[in-house]
Image (spheres, helix red, strand yellow):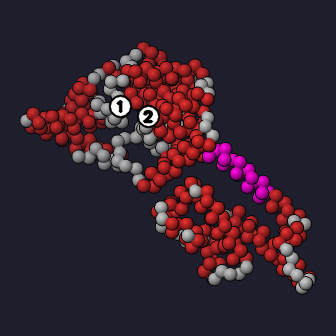
Amino acid sequence: MGESLKSERMIREYLLGRVSDETTLTQIEELLFSDEEFCSQVAMVEDSLINDYVLGSFNAADIETFRATLAGNPDRAFKVELTQALREKAVARNLQTSAEKPTFFAALSAFFHQPKYVGAFAVVLLAMLAGIVYFSRNRGSNDLAELRSMYSQSRPNESRISQFDYAPLSQLRGQQDSKDQSRLRRIENNLLEATEKKPGAETFHALGVFNLTQQKFPDAIGNFEKALTFNDKIAKLHNDLGAAHFELAKTVKDKRFEELSRSLEEFTKATELDSNLLEALFNKALVQQQLRLPQQARESWLLYLQKDASSPWAEEARKNLTKLESGQVSKNDDQILEDFLNAYRNRDETRAQEIHNETKGLLRGSAVALQLSRKYLLSRQGGDKTAAKESLEALTWLGRYERERHGEFFFLS
């Protein structure tokens, strides 16, 4: 990040609202979140701007832009009023005696004899102190709130993370845009700093949630376990640890059963601590379904629906229950692909789309698109031109469907 961002000229332009380049704005805002020295520098430049304005040192263009910033910045407007009042008092005192100029403290003392300003200043001072306390205590909470907002349109994992609102499961996508990457780096740095300055169940839990959303499952597990050393009676913490094990199970074939079993233990512990924790109830049914425990999974889904019958999560629960009762969960990857191809060959687009939608977010072998890709390559290598052609045509059809229905180009071959 260039030093030019920290120059007084650049800071003045930023405070006057004259920086229009989005990249530069993002970089300055990142500095404000991460660099305390830069924050102090910005405060000093802002004070200098206010003094220049009150003393009449601005040109016409600066006056116009400065005044435009006051409407949306009540704190700055109050500082201007305060500075003007101090200056007017000093000028008035100076007119009364030509012997010497009043000191700053004398002017300040005279200023505070005016009840109007004393009350206003006290309110602002208390607000500032409250703000400092609030942000020092709730920085991690704010970071998590921002993280949740980033995934309000599509969730990163199949399992439920504590306190995340419903969003459909995100599909396979490319790199996030640079603006999101910057926000994520800032959130991660803040959460790491919090664990260093105030290690505890809350800070390590928050960092683990961040890791979980970024699919850094071993890191998430490590941070959740650190959080448990401070307090092992937090139901949401056990739920999120279970979610990390559940998602990790999808990426490690040799330890899949072990990870799923660990996740079931954590979800069970979470429901024992809080029998109404919907995230844990949902996840427990999900892992039982993955472990091929149909009776237990069915009971868990029904229990969940007793406590949540109308949310979007309930709709997912019903779909999982339907799959469970229809026996689809027991099908292996080859059977799922064959079902899809049969629907595709019979031009049953509705059924083909259902199978694709049910598997495309799983990031493992049963995803139809991945199976079609493998089938195409193996067929070409084996000289089976008919099978290769069908696989490629089916992939192209899926690509068009995703583009037209969801605006998604990942599957477009």
Q: Residue at x 71, y 81 (%)?
A: 56
Question: What SS does tag 1 mark?
Answer: loop
Residue 195's tag is none
Please identify the quarter of the rendering in which residue 217 is found. Answer: top left
* Residue matched to label 2: 217
Sequence-first tag of 2 and 1: 2
> On the image, numbered disc 1 is attached to which residue?
251
| Crowd class of label 1 (few under 14; some 14 to 19; many from 20; radius 10 Å) | few
Q: Which residues are magenta?
A: 123-141
Label 2 crowding class (10 Å Cα cut-off): few <14, some 14-19, many 20+?
many
Residue 258 found in image quarter: top left
* Mark 2: amino acid: Phe
Q: Secondary structure at mark 2?
A: helix
Rendered location of residue 96, percent (x, y) = 92, 82
- Residue in the foreground of this view, choosing between 30 and 392: 30
- Reply yes or no: does residue 110 show up in magenta: no
* Residue 371 % position (x, y): 24, 33
Q: Are dots 2 and 1 in contact, CB under 8 Å?
A: yes
Given the current orientation, which residue lies at the most extreme bottom position?
Answer: 98
- The chief SS type of the magenta part is helix
Q: Is residue 102 visible?
A: yes
